[in-house]
Image (tube, rainbow, N blue to C red):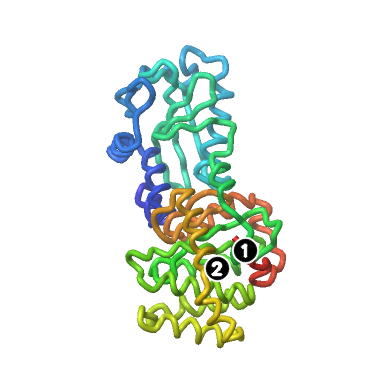
Amino acid sequence: MRAFITTALCRRCLLVVAALCVMAGTPCFAQSSSQTGTPPNGGSASSSGAGTSGGSSGGVGGVANEAAILQSSEAFVRKLFAWGPDFAVKLGPLSQSATPEFYRVPLQVTYKGQTEAGEVFVSKDGKTLFRGDMFEIGTDPFAVTRAKLRLEGDPTKGPADARVTIVEFSDYQCPHCRQLYTVMQVVEQKYPQVRIVYKDFPLAAIHPWATTAAVGARCAFAQSPEGFWNVHDMIFENQDVISSENVYQKVIDFAVRAGLDKEAFKVCLALPDAKAAIQADVDEGKAVQISSTPTVFVNGRPVIGGDETTLEQYIQFELGPQEATKPAPSAAPRGSTAPKKK
């Protein structure tokens, strides 16, 4: 199942792969532990460093609140990793870890007949879970990230009151971003009840024409939200023929094809407003610790690389079983939110 997790679930998503590797035990678990830290007071994160198990029936000497700790821990890891009803999750029994304040908790997850096993650590008051990172059980692990993501002022499509919002940070010259562009077309058709917000994160140091393309798309957005999506699509679809030498003329041509005012568009290209909007997106991306493109957030949950399978898993988890399977309402017109100054 490890091959399944690292390829099908998260082909390029290093963050989640690292998290799931911690669940796997064996060398991957040890490697992740050495990179991300060890339990408090120097306790080992490996099974060899854990204390003696209290047995399958009684846990640690028959802990009175064991069932409650395991129940809240299961709810939290399901939310953390987007493990919906299709994932069978088993935790326990509790056993004493090498550090007095934490229980060692075996963890087993099964999906489509394939099982992975590992362990996490939970504090004895049942409020903190440790797997290389500390989490406060009972809180939303993605709330802080979600609060940093602005949903207004950028190009968007889909219902404004959507239960699930995808925030995409992308680079027009990035090959993987073009792959994500294709994936998002599928996602948009399959889940029209989902809101999509597009943000610029041009990697100018390695993609010399990405910023100019982003400025062109922003200038299209200034004239027409619908025009933005047309120019956005044409840039990605013509990525192979755009160069540093022709990008300026290309975005003008795309704007004309999108029905935009050519002279107003050219004036916008010369003004600082579009670049300021792009820089605001870049600053926001840095605030949520983006270091590569594409990076997508599903209700604040990161997907580095935009893997389609992972995106669908997260969307379905956030929608819930009933909403994910029922027919979706018609999507709002592209660019339903007008541009705002930043």
Q: Which disc, if any, is residue 341?
A: 1
Front residue (pair 275, 94): 275
Asked which secondary structure carries label 1, the reply is loop
Q: Secondary structure at mark 2?
A: helix
Amino acid type at image mark 1: Lys
Q: Residue at x 44, y 36 (%)?
A: 108
Q: Nearer the viewer, residue 189 or 228?
A: 228
Location of residue 153 in the rendering, given as x and y in whole percent from the top left corner? 62, 62
Q: Which quadrant of the structure image shows residue 193?
A: bottom right
Residue at 41% of width from left, 60% of height from top?
293
Identified at 41% across, 32% down, the residue is 119
Q: Amino acid at mark 2?
A: Asp
Task: Between residue 91 and residue 49, name the one nearer to us.
Answer: 49
In screen coordinates, is 229 left or right of 10? Answer: right
Q: Are marks 2 and 1 in contact (CB under 8 Å)?
A: yes
Q: Quadrant of residue 335?
A: bottom right
Image spot of residue 200 (x, y percent): 49, 64
Q: Which residue is mark 2?
A: 273
Instruction: Give the quarter of the figure containing the C terminus.
Output: bottom right
Task: Please say if 38 is above or below 269.
Answer: above
